[in-house]
Image (cartoon, helix red, strand yellow):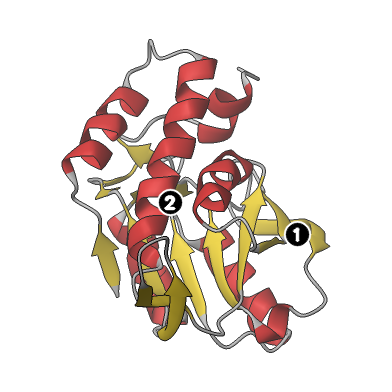
Amino acid sequence: MLHIIDHPLVQHKISLLRDKTTGTKEFRELVSEIAMFICYEATRDLPLKEIEIETPVAVAKTKIISGRKLAFVPILRAGLGMVDGVTKLVPAAKIGHIGLFRDPETKESVKYYFKLPEDIAERDTIIVDPMLATGNSAIAAIDELKKLGVKQIKFMCIICSPEGVEAVTKAHPDVEIYAGVQDEGLNEDKYIVPGVGDAGDRIFGTK
């Protein structure tokens, strides 16, 4: 299932992100900020339990998150740009890393790095990557997590394509997708249109 986060601040910041004149520093900050807003919605279903807290005035019955441990797994390298934003919301979450690159000829995902927390199977896991284009990298990352016994997986991105959403939903119908916006589609080079260009290059200033 696809969830579009249509909050005005998210939409405003995505507009700034798209602008080709937006520099590396601002682009990086925007990715982090948008990730934090989307994560806010992606964690809306975390369970709560009631506890008692003594305030300076009286004892309050209040709520805290109950029992669920989280992990964020960025797809390298662009996914790293979202980590700061999501960990500001959930600083106790553990971080894993999956390195995938797109073969320029086949457009398929190739794994080159894989390091996850030892207790990843016990954690609700959110995969983060700014772009969901063909869906190949997202599917490969989800495949790897499921092999390790991860039961609760969500995928979080800033911009998605209809093709990517369809591919992930077909391969993994149990994985919910959270995105800021869904664009028109993919061009012949499998880039999202209108998109933002190469998110990794723009985050790290490599192009």
Q: Secondary structure at mark 1?
A: strand
* Residue drawn at 56 percent across, 28 percent down: 203
Q: Height in image: 117 above or below 73?
A: below
* Residue drawn at 77 percent across, 80 percent down: 119
Viewer can see residue 175 = no
Q: Residues within 10 Å of mark 2 (few under 14, many from 20)?
A: many
Image location of residue 10, percent across then percent down: 27, 41
Q: Nearer the viewer, residue 70 or 140?
A: 70
Instruction: Judge from the rendering whether residue 62 lies leftward or rightward of residue 148; answer left or right.
Output: left
The amino acid type of the residue labelled 1 equals: Lys
* Residue drawn at 55 percent across, 58 percent down: 90
Q: Which residue is mark 2?
A: 133
Viewer can see residue 159 = yes
Instruction: Judge from the rendering whether residue 128 lies leftward or rightward of residue 12; answer left or right.
Output: right
Q: Secondary structure at mark 2?
A: loop
Q: Height in image: 168 above or below 123?
A: above
Kindly check if marks 1 and 2 are in contact, taking CB atoms under 8 A apart as contact.
no
Q: Residues within 10 Å of mark 1 (few under 14, many from 20)?
A: some
Image location of residue 116, percent across then percent down: 78, 67
Q: Quadrant of the C terminus?
A: top right
Instruction: Judge from the rendering whether residue 25 lies leftward or rightward of residue 195; answer left or right.
Output: right
Q: Which residue is mark 1?
A: 111
Q: Residue furthest front?
A: 57
Q: Height in image: 162 above or below 37?
A: below
* Sooner in the amino-acid sequence: mark 1 or mark 2: 1
Count of numbered tags: 2
